[in-house]
Image (cartoon, rainbow, N blue to C red):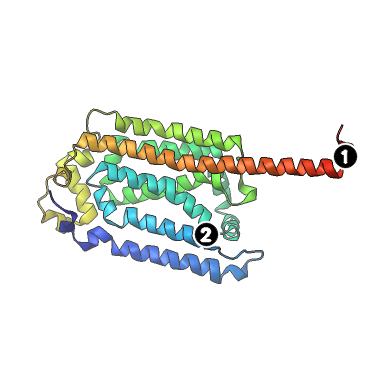
Amino acid sequence: MLTLDIFGFKALWSPYFLLILLALTAAYFLITITFRSKFQDSEPLTGKQAALFLTAMILLYAIKGSPLDLMGHLMFYIHGITMVILVLLIPPLFILSIPQWLWRSILQIKMIKPIFKLFTKPVIALLLFNGFFSFYHIPIIFDQVMQNRFYHGGYSILLFLLSVFMWWSLISPLSEYQPLSGIKKVAYLFANSMLITPACALIIFSDSSLYATYHDPEIWGKVMSLCVGPSIFSNLNLSGPELFSSMSLVDDQRLGGVVMKIIQEIIYAVILSQVFFEWYRKDQEESEREMKKQILNPNLVE
Protein backbone atom coordinates (compact mmCIF):
# COMPACT_ATOMS: atom_id res chain seq x y z
CA MET A 1 0.00 0.00 0.00
CA LEU A 2 1.35 3.40 -1.00
CA THR A 3 1.96 6.27 1.41
CA LEU A 4 1.22 9.97 1.02
CA ASP A 5 4.91 10.90 0.98
CA ILE A 6 5.01 10.33 -2.78
CA PHE A 7 3.05 13.56 -3.32
CA GLY A 8 5.69 15.82 -1.79
CA PHE A 9 5.81 18.45 0.95
CA LYS A 10 3.94 21.23 -0.92
CA ALA A 11 0.93 19.04 -1.72
CA LEU A 12 0.79 17.63 1.82
CA TRP A 13 1.23 20.81 3.87
CA SER A 14 0.07 23.69 1.61
CA PRO A 15 2.59 26.32 2.82
CA TYR A 16 0.90 29.15 0.87
CA PHE A 17 -2.43 28.43 2.55
CA LEU A 18 -0.64 28.46 5.91
CA LEU A 19 0.76 31.92 5.13
CA ILE A 20 -2.75 33.18 4.30
CA LEU A 21 -4.09 31.89 7.63
CA LEU A 22 -1.17 33.46 9.50
CA ALA A 23 -1.92 36.78 7.79
CA LEU A 24 -5.60 36.50 8.77
CA THR A 25 -4.61 35.73 12.36
CA ALA A 26 -2.29 38.73 12.48
CA ALA A 27 -5.07 40.93 11.06
CA TYR A 28 -7.50 39.62 13.68
CA PHE A 29 -5.24 40.59 16.59
CA LEU A 30 -4.28 43.90 14.96
CA ILE A 31 -7.94 44.90 14.57
CA THR A 32 -9.23 43.60 17.90
CA ILE A 33 -6.35 44.99 19.98
CA THR A 34 -4.84 47.97 18.16
CA PHE A 35 -7.97 49.47 16.57
CA ARG A 36 -10.29 48.89 19.54
CA SER A 37 -9.58 52.34 21.00
CA LYS A 38 -11.12 53.98 17.92
CA PHE A 39 -14.57 52.59 18.74
CA GLN A 40 -16.75 53.78 21.58
CA ASP A 41 -17.89 51.29 24.23
CA SER A 42 -15.59 48.61 22.81
CA GLU A 43 -14.74 45.85 25.23
CA PRO A 44 -11.19 44.39 25.24
CA LEU A 45 -10.48 41.09 23.52
CA THR A 46 -10.90 38.25 25.99
CA GLY A 47 -8.70 35.21 26.32
CA LYS A 48 -11.67 33.00 25.41
CA GLN A 49 -12.30 34.89 22.18
CA ALA A 50 -8.64 34.71 21.17
CA ALA A 51 -8.55 30.98 21.98
CA LEU A 52 -11.68 30.35 19.90
CA PHE A 53 -10.25 32.18 16.90
CA LEU A 54 -6.93 30.36 17.10
CA THR A 55 -8.77 27.04 17.40
CA ALA A 56 -10.81 27.90 14.31
CA MET A 57 -7.64 28.73 12.35
CA ILE A 58 -5.90 25.54 13.47
CA LEU A 59 -8.91 23.44 12.47
CA LEU A 60 -9.16 25.25 9.14
CA TYR A 61 -5.52 24.52 8.38
CA ALA A 62 -5.95 20.91 9.50
CA ILE A 63 -8.80 20.25 7.07
CA LYS A 64 -7.66 22.41 4.15
CA GLY A 65 -3.89 22.66 4.45
CA SER A 66 -2.65 19.47 6.11
CA PRO A 67 -2.51 15.92 4.63
CA LEU A 68 -6.18 15.52 5.66
CA ASP A 69 -7.17 17.62 2.65
CA LEU A 70 -5.28 15.31 0.30
CA MET A 71 -6.65 12.23 2.05
CA GLY A 72 -10.15 13.55 1.41
CA HIS A 73 -9.49 12.99 -2.31
CA LEU A 74 -8.48 9.40 -1.61
CA MET A 75 -11.06 8.33 0.99
CA PHE A 76 -14.62 9.62 1.11
CA TYR A 77 -14.97 9.22 4.87
CA ILE A 78 -12.08 11.66 5.38
CA HIS A 79 -13.87 14.07 3.07
CA GLY A 80 -16.99 13.65 5.24
CA ILE A 81 -15.07 14.50 8.41
CA THR A 82 -13.44 17.60 6.93
CA MET A 83 -16.72 18.80 5.41
CA VAL A 84 -18.62 18.60 8.71
CA ILE A 85 -15.80 20.37 10.57
CA LEU A 86 -15.79 23.13 7.93
CA VAL A 87 -19.53 23.86 8.06
CA LEU A 88 -20.62 22.79 11.55
CA LEU A 89 -17.68 23.33 13.91
CA ILE A 90 -15.53 26.19 12.61
CA PRO A 91 -18.38 28.71 11.95
CA PRO A 92 -19.66 28.83 15.57
CA LEU A 93 -16.08 29.19 16.82
CA PHE A 94 -15.59 32.05 14.37
CA ILE A 95 -18.83 33.81 15.38
CA LEU A 96 -18.03 33.66 19.08
CA SER A 97 -14.41 34.75 18.59
CA ILE A 98 -15.39 38.15 17.17
CA PRO A 99 -15.93 40.87 19.85
CA GLN A 100 -19.38 42.43 19.95
CA TRP A 101 -18.12 45.91 19.05
CA LEU A 102 -16.47 44.52 15.90
CA TRP A 103 -19.62 42.64 14.87
CA ARG A 104 -21.64 45.84 15.29
CA SER A 105 -19.11 47.80 13.24
CA ILE A 106 -19.29 45.22 10.45
CA LEU A 107 -23.09 45.09 10.48
CA GLN A 108 -23.35 48.88 10.28
CA ILE A 109 -21.83 48.82 6.79
CA LYS A 110 -24.65 49.74 4.39
CA MET A 111 -23.94 46.96 1.88
CA ILE A 112 -23.64 44.26 4.53
CA LYS A 113 -26.49 45.08 6.93
CA PRO A 114 -29.50 44.33 4.66
CA ILE A 115 -27.88 41.20 3.23
CA PHE A 116 -27.01 39.92 6.69
CA LYS A 117 -30.50 40.63 8.03
CA LEU A 118 -32.09 38.77 5.13
CA PHE A 119 -29.90 35.68 5.14
CA THR A 120 -29.89 35.28 8.93
CA LYS A 121 -33.68 35.04 9.09
CA PRO A 122 -34.11 31.58 10.67
CA VAL A 123 -36.25 29.97 7.95
CA ILE A 124 -34.14 31.34 5.10
CA ALA A 125 -30.86 30.39 6.79
CA LEU A 126 -32.18 26.91 7.62
CA LEU A 127 -33.36 26.13 4.09
CA LEU A 128 -30.40 27.65 2.26
CA PHE A 129 -27.71 25.92 4.30
CA ASN A 130 -29.29 22.46 4.31
CA GLY A 131 -30.39 22.83 0.69
CA PHE A 132 -26.93 23.70 -0.61
CA PHE A 133 -25.32 21.06 1.63
CA SER A 134 -27.60 18.36 0.20
CA PHE A 135 -27.25 19.75 -3.33
CA TYR A 136 -23.47 19.47 -3.03
CA HIS A 137 -23.72 15.74 -2.30
CA ILE A 138 -25.77 14.92 -5.40
CA PRO A 139 -23.28 12.74 -7.35
CA ILE A 140 -23.26 14.70 -10.62
CA ILE A 141 -22.84 18.01 -8.75
CA PHE A 142 -20.17 16.62 -6.41
CA ASP A 143 -18.09 15.26 -9.32
CA GLN A 144 -18.31 18.50 -11.29
CA VAL A 145 -17.33 20.62 -8.29
CA MET A 146 -14.38 18.39 -7.43
CA GLN A 147 -13.00 18.61 -10.98
CA ASN A 148 -12.80 22.41 -11.00
CA ARG A 149 -10.57 24.35 -8.62
CA PHE A 150 -12.74 27.47 -8.75
CA TYR A 151 -16.01 25.58 -8.32
CA HIS A 152 -14.58 23.68 -5.37
CA GLY A 153 -13.16 26.75 -3.64
CA GLY A 154 -16.24 28.85 -4.37
CA TYR A 155 -18.69 26.22 -3.16
CA SER A 156 -16.69 25.68 0.04
CA ILE A 157 -16.75 29.42 0.78
CA LEU A 158 -20.48 29.56 -0.01
CA LEU A 159 -21.25 26.67 2.36
CA PHE A 160 -19.15 28.31 5.07
CA LEU A 161 -21.02 31.62 4.74
CA LEU A 162 -24.41 29.89 4.71
CA SER A 163 -23.34 27.99 7.81
CA VAL A 164 -22.46 31.26 9.56
CA PHE A 165 -25.95 32.53 8.73
CA MET A 166 -27.49 29.29 9.98
CA TRP A 167 -25.56 29.34 13.28
CA TRP A 168 -26.26 33.04 13.89
CA SER A 169 -29.85 32.43 15.04
CA LEU A 170 -28.54 30.05 17.70
CA ILE A 171 -25.43 31.73 19.07
CA SER A 172 -25.59 35.40 18.06
CA PRO A 173 -23.47 37.41 20.54
CA LEU A 174 -25.54 40.56 19.89
CA SER A 175 -28.73 41.11 21.90
CA GLU A 176 -30.32 43.04 19.02
CA TYR A 177 -29.71 40.12 16.63
CA GLN A 178 -31.28 37.20 18.49
CA PRO A 179 -34.41 36.13 16.59
CA LEU A 180 -34.81 32.84 18.48
CA SER A 181 -35.00 31.92 22.14
CA GLY A 182 -35.96 28.97 24.33
CA ILE A 183 -38.13 26.35 22.64
CA LYS A 184 -37.69 28.00 19.22
CA LYS A 185 -33.96 27.24 19.33
CA VAL A 186 -34.73 23.61 20.17
CA ALA A 187 -37.11 23.39 17.20
CA TYR A 188 -34.53 25.07 14.97
CA LEU A 189 -31.86 22.52 15.94
CA PHE A 190 -34.29 19.66 15.42
CA ALA A 191 -35.20 20.97 11.95
CA ASN A 192 -31.51 21.26 11.05
CA SER A 193 -30.91 17.69 12.15
CA MET A 194 -33.83 16.42 10.08
CA LEU A 195 -33.02 18.38 6.92
CA ILE A 196 -29.43 17.16 6.78
CA THR A 197 -30.49 13.52 7.18
CA PRO A 198 -31.53 12.80 3.54
CA ALA A 199 -28.06 13.61 2.21
CA CYS A 200 -26.45 11.31 4.79
CA ALA A 201 -29.04 8.58 4.17
CA LEU A 202 -28.38 8.68 0.41
CA ILE A 203 -24.70 8.05 1.08
CA ILE A 204 -25.14 5.46 3.83
CA PHE A 205 -27.73 3.21 2.18
CA SER A 206 -26.46 3.21 -1.40
CA ASP A 207 -25.39 -0.23 -2.67
CA SER A 208 -22.88 1.22 -5.11
CA SER A 209 -20.21 3.89 -5.24
CA LEU A 210 -22.03 7.14 -6.02
CA TYR A 211 -19.13 9.42 -6.82
CA ALA A 212 -17.04 9.02 -9.97
CA THR A 213 -14.42 11.13 -8.18
CA TYR A 214 -13.46 7.96 -6.30
CA HIS A 215 -14.26 5.10 -8.71
CA ASP A 216 -13.58 6.49 -12.19
CA PRO A 217 -9.79 6.48 -12.86
CA GLU A 218 -10.02 9.30 -15.42
CA ILE A 219 -12.03 11.65 -13.21
CA TRP A 220 -10.02 10.71 -10.11
CA GLY A 221 -6.84 11.49 -12.02
CA LYS A 222 -8.15 14.91 -13.01
CA VAL A 223 -9.13 15.68 -9.42
CA MET A 224 -5.75 14.57 -8.09
CA SER A 225 -3.92 16.60 -10.74
CA LEU A 226 -5.66 19.72 -9.43
CA CYS A 227 -4.81 18.74 -5.87
CA VAL A 228 -1.10 17.90 -6.16
CA GLY A 229 -0.18 19.51 -9.49
CA PRO A 230 -0.31 18.01 -13.02
CA SER A 231 3.47 17.54 -13.35
CA ILE A 232 3.77 15.67 -10.05
CA PHE A 233 0.74 13.46 -10.64
CA SER A 234 1.68 12.52 -14.20
CA ASN A 235 5.00 11.08 -12.99
CA LEU A 236 3.39 8.82 -10.36
CA ASN A 237 1.42 6.47 -12.66
CA LEU A 238 -1.42 5.96 -10.19
CA SER A 239 -4.65 4.18 -11.16
CA GLY A 240 -7.01 5.03 -8.31
CA PRO A 241 -7.56 5.62 -4.58
CA GLU A 242 -7.62 1.86 -3.88
CA LEU A 243 -3.82 2.01 -3.86
CA PHE A 244 -3.98 3.94 -0.55
CA SER A 245 -6.71 2.07 1.34
CA SER A 246 -7.80 -1.54 1.85
CA MET A 247 -11.42 -0.45 2.38
CA SER A 248 -13.88 -1.00 -0.47
CA LEU A 249 -15.36 2.08 -2.12
CA VAL A 250 -18.88 1.29 -0.88
CA ASP A 251 -17.72 0.73 2.71
CA ASP A 252 -15.68 3.91 2.58
CA GLN A 253 -18.70 5.81 1.28
CA ARG A 254 -21.02 4.39 3.94
CA LEU A 255 -18.53 5.19 6.68
CA GLY A 256 -18.38 8.75 5.37
CA GLY A 257 -22.15 9.14 5.65
CA VAL A 258 -22.19 7.66 9.15
CA VAL A 259 -19.32 9.85 10.33
CA MET A 260 -20.96 13.02 8.99
CA LYS A 261 -24.21 12.22 10.76
CA ILE A 262 -22.56 11.25 14.07
CA ILE A 263 -20.34 14.35 14.24
CA GLN A 264 -23.31 16.54 13.32
CA GLU A 265 -25.42 15.01 16.10
CA ILE A 266 -22.62 15.47 18.65
CA ILE A 267 -22.19 19.16 17.75
CA TYR A 268 -25.95 19.77 17.85
CA ALA A 269 -26.21 17.93 21.19
CA VAL A 270 -23.59 20.23 22.72
CA ILE A 271 -25.43 23.32 21.46
CA LEU A 272 -28.75 21.87 22.64
CA SER A 273 -27.36 21.40 26.15
CA GLN A 274 -26.22 25.04 26.15
CA VAL A 275 -29.67 26.15 24.96
CA PHE A 276 -31.33 24.25 27.81
CA PHE A 277 -28.84 25.67 30.34
CA GLU A 278 -29.48 29.21 29.09
CA TRP A 279 -33.23 28.60 29.17
CA TYR A 280 -33.04 27.23 32.72
CA ARG A 281 -30.84 30.11 33.88
CA LYS A 282 -33.22 32.75 32.50
CA ASP A 283 -36.18 30.95 34.05
CA GLN A 284 -34.43 30.91 37.43
CA GLU A 285 -33.55 34.60 37.18
CA GLU A 286 -37.16 35.42 36.33
CA SER A 287 -38.38 33.38 39.31
CA GLU A 288 -35.95 35.16 41.61
CA ARG A 289 -37.11 38.57 40.35
CA GLU A 290 -40.73 37.62 40.96
CA MET A 291 -39.91 36.41 44.45
CA LYS A 292 -38.09 39.66 45.29
CA LYS A 293 -41.08 41.67 44.06
CA GLN A 294 -43.38 39.68 46.33
CA ILE A 295 -41.08 40.18 49.32
CA LEU A 296 -40.71 43.92 48.72
CA ASN A 297 -44.37 44.39 47.81
CA PRO A 298 -46.41 41.90 49.84
CA ASN A 299 -49.63 43.72 48.88
CA LEU A 300 -49.19 42.36 45.35
CA VAL A 301 -49.81 38.83 46.62
CA GLU A 302 -53.50 38.00 46.62
What's the residue at 32%, 35% (across, down)? 138
In the figure, is residue 99 to the left or right of 151? right
Distance between mark 1 and mark 2 Cα atoms = 43 Å
Above or below residue 65? Residue 244 is above
Q: Nearer the viewer, residue 63 or 137?
A: 63
What's the residue at 52%, 67% (across, down)? 31
What's the residue at 12%, 45% (across, down)? 239
**x, y percentage for residue 13?**
27, 60
Quadrant of res 35: bottom right
**x, y percentage for residue 260?**
36, 39
Question: Label for residue 71?
Answer: none
Question: Label for residue 298?
Answer: 1
Q: Is residue 262 visible?
A: yes
**x, y percentage for residue 122?**
55, 39
Q: Residues within 10 Å of mark 2 (few under 14, many from 20)?
A: few
- Disc 2 target residue: 48
Q: Secondary structure at mark 1?
A: helix
Callout 1 touching callout 2 (CB < 8 Å): no
Q: Nearer the viewer, residue 146 or 264?
A: 264
Q: Secondary structure at mark 2?
A: helix
Q: Amino acid at mark 2?
A: Lys
Quadrant of res 134: top left
Viewer-side label of 1, 2: 1
Q: Amino acid at mark 1?
A: Pro
What's the residue at 51%, 53% (across, down)? 95
Q: Residue furthest right?
A: 299
**x, y percentage for residue 9?**
22, 62
